[in-house]
């Protein structure tokens, strides 16, 4: 047998140590790879789950104060959506600030799992002009789910207003335009937009008084602190019926059927051409929502729009359910983009911004 030298033993030991190190290294790498694969599998499995996720509430984000028309709509929808969505809980979250941009930005950045959506009105189309850097892009950062309804606007005044019809009101504004106060519920609100359109149609400018919510504006209108307001029928109906404010016109192409408004002329009838505005509402999710989840949401919304109890609540406030193609996501998106183009020059001409 050939003798093994000390150098050969050392070399053999070195080779064995190196081999063991390589085996251990490969084993560690394999464990790391396995751990990563298991982690990735868990993440993929979570995202692969169909909407709705078990035991997770659906959150409807509203960019306005509680008690306003968008909030009331969201709360009525929260109740009506549970069954068609197949969830136990639908909550409403009011997030204020920057004319609705803060709430809208939150939804844009939310997980696209279908559990966070936004209900917004016409402000979805005016934010790109009112907020010069809102932190999102309406056309690319959202999944459009469908439109819900439209609410007409009404021209109203303090109860002590001298004018008894719109012709007299128009003449009074012409004589007193340096003293007239036109209230609104804040920059970017429905009443703010209606006021901008009204001034543009009348080719006049009056002092505007922004409030933090429509309830404050109506309180001051009843008290005579402001003269005029152009706001949604869902907000003004009860005060008109109680004769706490005066009503002069509605902003729809045709007169409204509700007894409170049926005697009021439209702005078109009064000769104010082009003055037509309704405050529409739509539902939006974050971008990246799966086709399946988008389809489930759209189907649920369509079901709610035919729910007799939900429809009656909205119609009692003067709202009109949307039944045309705008209930479809693609038509909804197309309509919103056309509204952005409509409002952009009006807002820029006014030079009023929410940021």
Image (cartoon, rainbow, N blue to C red):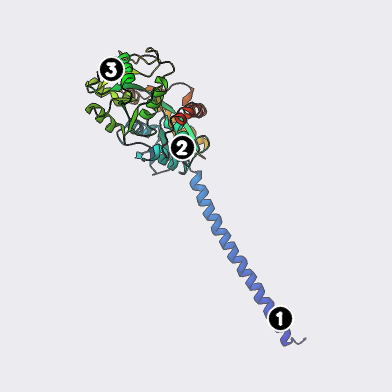
Quadrant occupied by the C terminus? top left
**Residue density around tag 3, few if under 14, some if 14–19, many if 20 or more, within 10 Å:** some
Closer to the observer: label 3 or label 1? 3
Rounded to the nearest whole Å, what is the CA distance between mark 3 and mark 1?
102 Å
Write down the quadrant of residue 229 in the picture: top left
Q: Name the residue under label 3.
A: 260
Proximity of marks 3 and 1: CB atoms separated by less than 8 Å: no
Residue 89 seen anywhere in this rendered image of the structure: no
Residue 153 point in image, percent of width and height: 35, 22
Residue placed most toward the observer, 206 or 19? 206
| Residue at 41 percent of width and 43 percent of height | 54
Side of 192 where 140 appears, left or right: right
Q: Mark 2 points at which residue?
A: 285
| Residue at 35 percent of width and 36 percent of height | 64
Residue 28 point in image, percent of width and height: 58, 66
User: What is the secondary structure assignment of the residue under circle 2?
Assistant: strand
**Residue density around tag 1, few if under 14, some if 14–19, many if 20 or more, within 10 Å:** few
Rounded to the nearest whole Å, what is the CA distance between mark 1 and mark 2?
66 Å
Proximity of marks 3 and 2: CB atoms separated by less than 8 Å: no
- N-terminal of the pair, mark 3 or mark 1, is 1
Q: Name the residue under label 1.
A: 11
User: What is the secondary structure assignment of the residue under circle 1?
Assistant: helix
Write down the quadrant of residue 322 in the picture: top left
Residue 138 seen anywhere in this rendered image of the structure: yes
User: What is the secondary structure assignment of the residue under circle 3?
Assistant: loop
Farthest residue, direction right: 2
Rounded to the nearest whole Å, what is the CA distance between mark 3 and mark 2?
36 Å
In the rendered image, the vertical position of residue 18 relative to residue 157, given as above or below = below
Closer to the observer: label 1 or label 2? 2
Side of 107 where 312 appears, left or right: left
The dot on residue 310 is none
In the rendered image, the vertical position of residue 303 relative to residue 115, given as above or below = above
């Amino acid at each position: 047998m050939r003798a093994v030298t000390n150098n050969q033993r050392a070399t053999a030991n070195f080779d064995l140590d190196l081999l063991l190190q390589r085996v251990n290294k490969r084993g560690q790498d394999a464990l790391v790879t396995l751990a990563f694969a298991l982690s990735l599998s868990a993440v993929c499995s979570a995202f692969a789950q169909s909407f709705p996720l078990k035991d997770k509430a659906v959150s409807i984000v509203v960019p306005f104060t509680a008690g306003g028309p968008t909030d009331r709509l969201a709360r009525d929808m929260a109740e009506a959506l549970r069954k068609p969505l197949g969830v136990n809980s639908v909550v409403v979250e009011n997030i204020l600030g920057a004319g609705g941009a803060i709430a809208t930005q939150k939804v844009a950045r939310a997980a696209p799992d279908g559990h966070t959506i936004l209900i917004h009105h016409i402000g979805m189309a005016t934010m790109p002009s009112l907020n010069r850097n809102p932190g999102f892009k309406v056309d690319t950062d959202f999944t459009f789910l469908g439109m819900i309804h439209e609410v007409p606007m009404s021209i109203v005044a303090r109860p002590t207003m001298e004018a008894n019809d719109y012709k007299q009101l128009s003449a009074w504004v012409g004589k007193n335009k340096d003293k007239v106060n036109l209230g609104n519920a804040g920059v970017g609100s429905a009443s703010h937009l209606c006021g901008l359109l009204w001034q543009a149609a009348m080719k006049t400018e009056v002092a505007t008084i922004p409030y933090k919510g429509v309830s404050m504006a109506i309180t001051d209108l009843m008290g005579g602190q402001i003269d005029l307001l152009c706001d949604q029928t869902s907000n003004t109906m009860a005060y008109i019926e109680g004769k706490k404010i005066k009503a002069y016109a509605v902003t729809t192409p045709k007169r409204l059927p509700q007894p409170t408004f049926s005697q009021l002329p439209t702005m078109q009838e009064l000769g104010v051409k082009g003055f037509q505005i309704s405050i529409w509402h739509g539902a939006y999710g974050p971008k990246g929502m799966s086709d399946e989840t988008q389809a489930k949401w759209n189907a649920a919304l369509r079901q709610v729009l035919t729910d007799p109890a939900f429809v009656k609540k909205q119609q009692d406030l003067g709202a009109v359910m949307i039944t045309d193609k705008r209930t479809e996501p693609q038509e909804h998106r197309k309509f919103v983009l056309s509204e952005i183009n409509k409002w952009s020059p009006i807002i820029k001409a006014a030079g009023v911004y929410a940021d």
